[in-house]
Amino acid sequence: MFDRRLAQNFDWGLLGLTLTIAVVGLVTLYSAVNAGDQTAAERALFVKQLIWYGAGFVAMVFSFLISYKHLDRLAPVIYIGTILLLLAVLWTGKIGGGARRWLILGPISIQPSEIAKIMVIIILARYYSRVPTTNGYNLRELLNPFLLLVVPCILVLNQPDLGTAIHMALIAGAITVFVKIERRSFITLVSSLALAGPVVWFFLKEYQKRRILTFLNPDRDPLGAGYHIIQSKIAIGSGMISGKGFLKGTQNALSFLPEQHTDFIFSVLAEEWGFIGGFFVLMLFALLLVRGLHVAFGCRDLFGMTICVGITAMIFWQVVINIGMVMGLMPVVGVPLPFVSYGGSSIVTMMICMGLLMNVRMRRFLFD
Amino acid sequence: MFKDFKIGKLRFESFLHSLGPDVYKQRIVGIMFIVLASFLVLLGRLFYLQVLQGQNYFKLSEVNSIRLEDVAPTRGLILDRHGELLVDNRPAFEVSIVLKEARSLMQTIEEMAQYLDTSPDEIMDKVKAKRGRQQYNPVLLKQDVDRNAVGAIEAHIYDLPGIHVNVRPTRHYVQKSLAAHLIGYLSEISQTELASEKYRGYRAGDFIGKVGIEKQFEPYLKGTRGGRQVEVNAVGQVVRVLKTVPAEPGHNIYLTIDASLQRVAESLLEGKAGAVLAMVPQTGEVLALASSPSYDSNVFVCGMTHECWQGLTANPFRPLENKAVDAVYPPASVYKIVTAMAGLGEGIIDENLTVTCTGGYPFGNRTFRCWKKWGHGKVDVYRAIAESCDVYFYEVGQQLGVDRLAWYASACGLGTPTGIELDSEAKGLVPTAAWKKRRTGESWQGGETLAIAIGQGYNLVTPLQTLVMTAAVANGGNLLKPLVVKEIKSAEEKVLFQSKPTQVGRLPASDSILDVIRKGLFKVVNERKGTAHIAHIDGIEVSGKTGTAQVVSRKGNQQAMDEDGRPLHLKAHAWFVAYAPSKSPEIAVTVIIEHGEHGSSAAAPIAREVIRHYLAPSEVLPVSDEENGSPGQGEQRTLH
């Protein structure tokens, strides 16, 4: 049943890369929760994250042991299961920071919206690999995948979690562009979106407009997002070339950084390790993405290929949005930095993604 | 299960049907370029921030010179129905210290101790409590610092690094204790409140409404916090304001209260424990809501001393309790309105039926007494109400049974909150046979029904419930939600909310039955033998009902035990409910005086003065305790 060649074809390079990023992430998180006068509960986050990595490792092994080809069949079950989880969150979820995002399962709380991202990748891969196209998909053919995406997006928006909803839409968009959209449909789609914008804007309420403008331009909110970005830029910039040193980041230690162990953790890293450290981490992520695309390149079925492209797109958007945001290039939106930000669901999801990439990679010569 | 595939031609012909995977491979290569290009942008930005601008940002991080400062909003005003100011804000100075800036902390603290007139140790304690991560967040040393001290500190501010003086708008209860129970007070937000979802966006040190209107209308009153992004120098002095978001003031609340009537009501209550309530019967607008003893709300804002708190909580007359709304009492003879309504509604009595009162009512092996020892003789329903004949109502109650009485009482709004917008409202209790079984496990006794019929026994009502009921009798049967807020206006005088009468129920009585009851209530005041003839006013027709509630039956009242032996606490509570003018009522009033003994002598004169002030303000006479009504007219009833 288990081919010996599977072990031979195992992607040790990807595993090594994953572990390296994990170590960098843990070291940064340690500093983020220890450098200042954090509370005991905050310090405990480091140990929690270690445990999550353990759980993530197990999830990763599971994700590459069973052939990804079974996922094709299981996709509807996974889809419905995740939708039910998202409904459960809205129904009974725990409120934190004004949003209902967590589902309590005994001693742990999970964030189903993270898992939903993988679910979107798998269900779209199934759809596109079963409905082949030569000239690209037209609008009618795109209706189904659109509906498949909209359902989880609306549920996530209701939590409300704008960041994750946008992220899911971006992943789906990347996959769809990858499998090709028919030229005329593509033009219609883009132009109708461009036209719909101003029309929708006209019907928005004043406060909704204000929120979107602040999202696009944090400077409009000098006491909230705008201030956070200024402090984040000061933190990153003050790291200069070689950084202030491990546990020596003053912006971090004195709590001038908001959300320093989640959304703004890259600022902690850049302050303490400087341009050298930031460059190193950016390179690691770039290598990871190239590796993901390489796995897609070597895969011979469209289903596996689409999964790899989807996972790469997921990590790509997350890294670019998060790091772009803390450096003041992107709107302020709560997206965690993969492998580095604190968050159990995010870590486990990332490890599952790595497992799936390994899965596709080691079965690239197998066909059933 | 798995078949091997050799690398070679087969790979390109396989399962991708007509499509060669190389089409996809081209796209993958394309994606790779996009990824690398994006990362180059990120890297470029990182290079710009850290290498090109690094020096500048490093300097900024050295002094942490970009800070946020709060601009506190002014809280909305509270005014009476005519716009008389009840609550506003005054500027108060507060002194705080930023630890990171206070070079030589000890020296600064010692100097500050002199200016603030405390000991260095005391300041050190405050600093230590807050010491920790927020080294750049100011630690409050003293609030409401007097002007002289502020002057001295400001003069030496450059020798006091890290010391900041701020002006913070502070709540000011202009009329001191006037309507204190209704208005409520502000106090510092507690840890549990901070953690709750309801107070999202609040911070430690914020003042929030804790009681009354201040609490209930907090979202309207609070306003929106503003702030400034500022650049400071090494000692924390602001050198440049980078950006400002102005604070928005809270909304102003116009109460339904008539301040002058409220003042009269409170002066009439002076030295007594009890409550006076008044309402416009047609709209449900509360004109006065006085509870005595009272307190000065300002003490809560300026930081209460331990002794002061002790004095408020240990006082057996419970100054913090809003007796008009939070306290429950047996309704006593006021309840006879309900019993009469039920008797008439169920056809047990009519206008003409008479009962002969001999001063007692034999039931089982006991005799239930009427308050009038020698009996009233032959009484019809009018005389029964006017002279509050117990025997008549024993008879009616006995025929009705407890559960039918309870139905009528509940329909009159007793036993349920009236819906007034104050969160501490008590519910009261309308007992039924099933309730007693549930509560005590024992069956209902027939004799208990007799006690219920005259408003004693397990019956408990709030003064506000009796007011709503009295207003309904006056307005033709509509039970209205008591309104305390008339209008809410923004600081720009834009009307945001206007209250309108809200009917919550109807008295269970036809117009003709209501006429009978109103005629009876008219005779209470206007017939010479009526129990409240004392409340008669020349030129104004008043209708009402007295009540005298037995203290011993008040469950959970610890006063009798706290002060055992003192006769005061064995005295009955005095009730009077009234409305005037009888023909087209403009005001309904409830008065309860704890341990006032007789509704006729203790409560009725107060109601009379409230009505007189409202309807004929020029003729106000000082009320004296020694009214010269004949004592024989007071009702006195005992239950043996």
Image: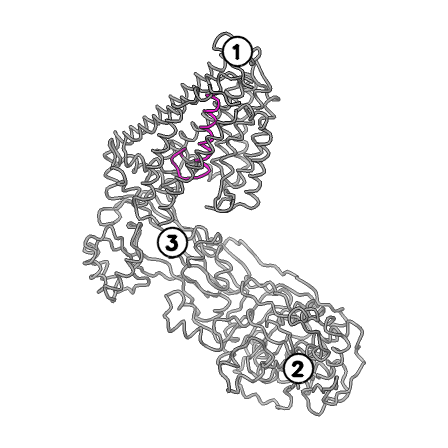
Three-letter amino acid code at the position of disc 2? Val
Three-letter amino acid code at the position of disc 3? Ala
Rounded to the nearest whole Å, what is the CA distance between mark 1 and mark 3? 67 Å
Where residue B525 is drawn, which disc sits there?
2
Query: Which residue does the numbered mark 3 point to in the structure image?
Result: B72
Q: Is residue A52 magenta?
A: no
Three-letter amino acid code at the position of disc 1? Gly
Name the main secondary structure of what is drawn in magenta.
helix
In this view, the mark in front (1 or 2): 1
Q: What's drawn in magenta, residue-wise?
A: A337-362
Which residue sits at x=37%, y=65%? B302
Residue B567 located left or right of residue A38: right
Q: Quick one: label 1 or label 2, which is nearer the N terminus?
A: 1
Rounded to the nearest whole Å, what is the CA distance between mark 3 and mark 2? 55 Å
Residue B604 located left or right of residue B221: right
Which residue sits at x=63%, y=66%? B416
Rounded to the nearest whole Å, what is the CA distance between mark 1 and mark 2? 104 Å
Query: Which residue does the numbered mark 1 point to in the structure image?
Result: B20
Residue B634 visible, this orientation:
yes
Q: Quadrant of the C terminus of chain B?
A: bottom right
Q: Quadrant of the N terminus of chain B?
A: top right
